[in-house]
Image: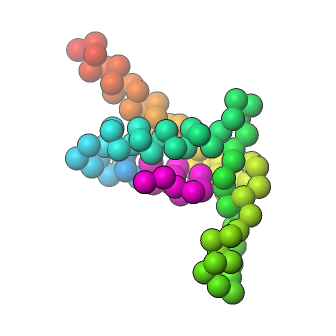
Amino acid sequence: MKYQTIDEGGAVSHALLELNARRPKEIYLCAFEGLKGKIDKQGNIYGTCIGTSTQNTLEDYYQRATPVNDWHGQGPVILGACAAASVLRQCRDKIHE
């Protein structure tokens, strides 16, 4: 499953790792791959939908704008990066055991 917006992808990938699911590392790394695809080499974040209140229709809600570097995406990206660092540390530690 791929998430359309970075805030959904980042939050879900972080939550999966925190929940310690049966295969958290594999699931998380898959989610993080999608998150990485929304960040360019300059660090610009793409695909974060704007905040919104009630919309007239469900279609209006789904069609919200996704401006580059919208502030709603910064937290999920930071959480996702921190979780990635944690997964990579765990993998490295297992190799060196």
Does 49 sit above or below residue 79?
below
Which residue is pictured at 65% across the width and 39% down the height? 39
The segment highlighted magenta reads: 1-14
Q: Residue furthest bottom?
A: 56
Question: Which quadrant, please, contains the C terminus?
Answer: top left
Which residue is pictured at 41% across the width and 32% down the height? 86
Image side of residue 87 versus residue 76, left or right: left
Question: Which quadrant, please, contains the N terminus?
Answer: bottom left
Does 52 sit above or below residue 28?
below
Q: Quadrant of residue 59?
A: bottom right
Image side of residue 40 versus residue 82, left or right: right
Asked whether the viewer can see residue 48, the reply is yes
Residue 40 locus on image (x, y percent):
69, 35
Give yes or no for residue 3 being in the magenta stretch: yes
Image side of residue 42 versus residue 77, left or right: right
How many numbered marks are there?
0
Residue 10 locus on image (x, y percent):
52, 49
Asked whether the viewer can see residue 78, the reply is no
Residue 55 locus on image (x, y percent):
68, 82
Give yes or no for residue 42 being in the magenta stretch: no
Does 73 sit above or below residue 44?
below
Relative depth, front residue between 7 and 89: 7
Which colour style is shown?
rainbow
SS majority, magenta: helix
Which residue is pictured at 41% across the width and 41% down the height? 30
Residue 72 locus on image (x, y percent):
67, 57
Which residue is pictured at 52% across the width and 44% down the height? 34
